Amino acid sequence: MSEEREESFISHLIELRDRLIRALLAVFIVFLALVPWAREIYTLLAAPMLAALPEGGHMIATDVAGAFFVPIKVTMMVAFLIALPYVLYQAWAFVAPGLYAHEKKLALPLLIASVLLFFVGMTFAYFIVFPTVFAFINAFAPEGVAVMTDIEKYLSFVLTTFLAFGVTFEVPVVVIVLVRVGLVSIEKLKEIRPYVIVGCFVVGAIFTPPDVLSQFLLAVPMWLLYEGGIILARLIGKAEHAEDGAYHPVAPSAATTAEGERERG
């Protein structure tokens, strides 16, 4: 028995290794395909800042190799995002055989929703937050001060903001999971709403630049997504109750049929 368990454990490790290799190869192949356009990819990422800079303003590279490594880092990030569906498929293929049918029924939609919401959060940050915040900040530059942003620091800011908004948009999924596993009830979620709102603004103050506008741009969507998670959790709960309480006609057994015939006779 112990030998069978050891063989099973080793086989799982081998499968995990193979799937990790496939995922890394997918990211690497996409990265190699995108490398020739590394400069254009970085220019696209920097477009919100470049558009908000005053006339004559531009970005700079203070590090010796920054002009080379920063576009490469951005290209690697884009390659990972493009290959993410395949990476998640490998993770799902490894985990799915160990799940029950009802767990698969819940886990797969939540996984897909998590990925989509993360991308939506990044898109919201790029098209809404960046132009608004950069224009707001650069408008307060003192007279005679040339606004020149270092590309390394800009990349760090962008990645932090993408991560903050991507995780923020996962709030509905977190709420649904907490309700589904029974850790918290919908009534409790409504009860703690004031504390959640305060927490949203605290998170916004920590993960955004030190201005009120960007704090609101993170805190308000986070609160609205929390409310959306409560609504979705209630709808999912009602759907499950309706499914559990559905009428399923059962064919009469042979014994019951024979007994009925004897009574009629």
Image: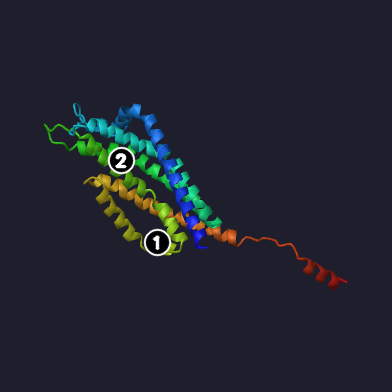
Per the image, the residue denoted by label 1 is 189
Could you tell me which residue is drawn at 22 percent across and 33 percent down? 66
Mark 1 is on which residue type?
Leu
Asked if 96 appears above or below 52 in the picture, the reply is below
The image shows a total of numbered marks equal to 2
Instruction: Say which residue appears at 36% left-offset and 60% top-offset.
Output: 193
Q: Badge 1: how crowded within 10 Å, few (<14), some, or many (20+)?
A: some
Of the image marks 1 and 2, the number of the one nearer the N terminus: 2
- Residue 143 at what x, y percent from top left? 12, 33
What is the quadrant of residue 253 in the picture?
bottom right
Instruction: Please tell me whether residue 67 is drawn above or below residue 225 in the rendered image.
Output: above
- Check the image and name the residue furthest to the front: 3
Image coordinates of residue 39 in percent, x first then y, are 30, 28
- Closer to the camera, 33 or 171? 33
Q: Nearer the viewer, residue 25 or 68?
A: 25
Task: Give the quadrant of the C terminus.
Answer: bottom right
Q: At which x and y percent is residue 43?
A: 29, 29
Q: Dot 2 corresponds to which residue?
A: 129
Label 2: how many residues lie within 10 Å, few (<14), some (14-19) or many (20+)? Answer: some
Type of amino acid at the residue the image marks with label 2: Val
Quarter of the image where one finds residue 78: top left
Contact (Cβ within 8 Å) of mark 1 with mark 2: no
Secondary structure at numbered mark 2: helix
**Outermost residue toward the bottom in this view:** 263
Residue 113 screen position, x and y as percent: 45, 47
Q: Is residue 39 visible?
A: yes
